[in-house]
Amino acid sequence: MKLLLCTDMDRTVIPNGHQLEAPEARQNFRQFCADPSVTLVYVTGRHRQLVQDAIEEFELPWPDYAITDVGTRIYQIRDDQQWQSMRDWEVEIDQDWINLEPQSVLDLLSGIHGIRLQEESKQNPHKISFYIDLEKLNEATCLARVSERLESLKCAVNKIWSIDETSQTGLLDILPSRANKLHAIEFLQAHLNYAADEVIFAGDSGNDLEVLISKVPSVLVANATDDLKQQTLKIVQSKGTEKQFYLAENLEGYSGHYSAGVLQGVFHYRPEFEQRYLKGL
């Protein structure tokens, strides 16, 4: 009996959205993740330092692994909290960007009105990130213009769109095609030798969509936007992956927001873990 629990951070286990967090939700989450049969993986757009900052600020459990920078980096976190980068993953995703200079991408996109480069700390050799002014560009228009500009590079890129609800700012990440949350989770799953039904993912936003609609058992927490809920439900129905998708709910006395929603989804897929957890209370 084992579980590879992969979860997004912001507005998933971090209660930094508009909705209220249930009392003791994070305490319960920490207690659950302390079970030695649970391997915890944070899957986030944050870079390493921001992951560490969030763990300390919000008193989150320390993970065993972290997939950071929107899937472009994988770290193992040892017992002494030392982070070891998984070099094999960087080699894997670099195949798409051989001889590509990030400056080439910047030059091509610099003329699009409404796009602004994010801070240097949020960039790496496999990740070029922008802020999008939503009053000037919506998702469809932005992605169309970016795709048209990047066509001349003739290399495989992955464009990840999401919205920061707290600031109502669009976020766009340009990555190698192989660099995405889904492929990173599957890469780590294979590396650690977990079966398909021993992995669960939880998320809340658009950059989690590729995992939420996949064959990986997934949880969309209740504080996700209504638009994302409807979009995800529609896609999983068309793809036939409804059984691999769970939408957390706010039930009487049972919150589906943030980490409470993550646990709700875990117990849906793996009820034996709920029984084990309850016995430990």
Image: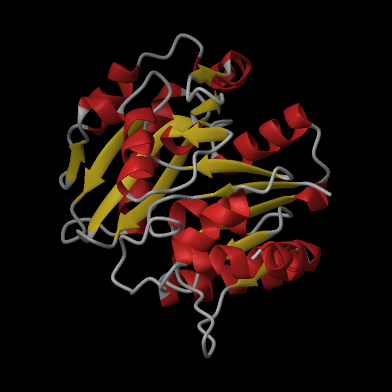
The image quarter in which residue 238 lies: bottom right
Which residue: 61% across, 35% down?
184
- Outermost residue toward the top? 99
Is 194 situated left or right of 175 in this image? Answer: right
208 or 195: nearer the eye? 195
Which residue: 54% across, 38% down?
63
26 or 138: nearer the eye? 26
In the rendered view, would you say 59 is above or below 153? below
The image quarter in which residue 4 lies: top right
Quadrant the C terminus occupies: bottom right
In the rendered view, would you say 217 is above or below 123? below
Is 144 situated left or right of 219 in this image? Answer: left
Which residue: 60% across, 21% down?
89
Colour scheme shown: secondary structure
Is 108 situated left or right of 48 in this image? Answer: left
Residue 22 on image: x %, y %: 42, 74
Report how many numbered discs are placed on residues in the image.
Answer: 0
Which residue: 39% across, 50% down?
161
Does residue 255 appear in the picture of this structure? Answer: yes
Residue 71 on image: x %, y %: 51, 35
Residue 171 on image: x %, y %: 30, 48
Does residue 239 appear in the picture of this structure? Answer: no
Residue 158 on image: x %, y %: 49, 37
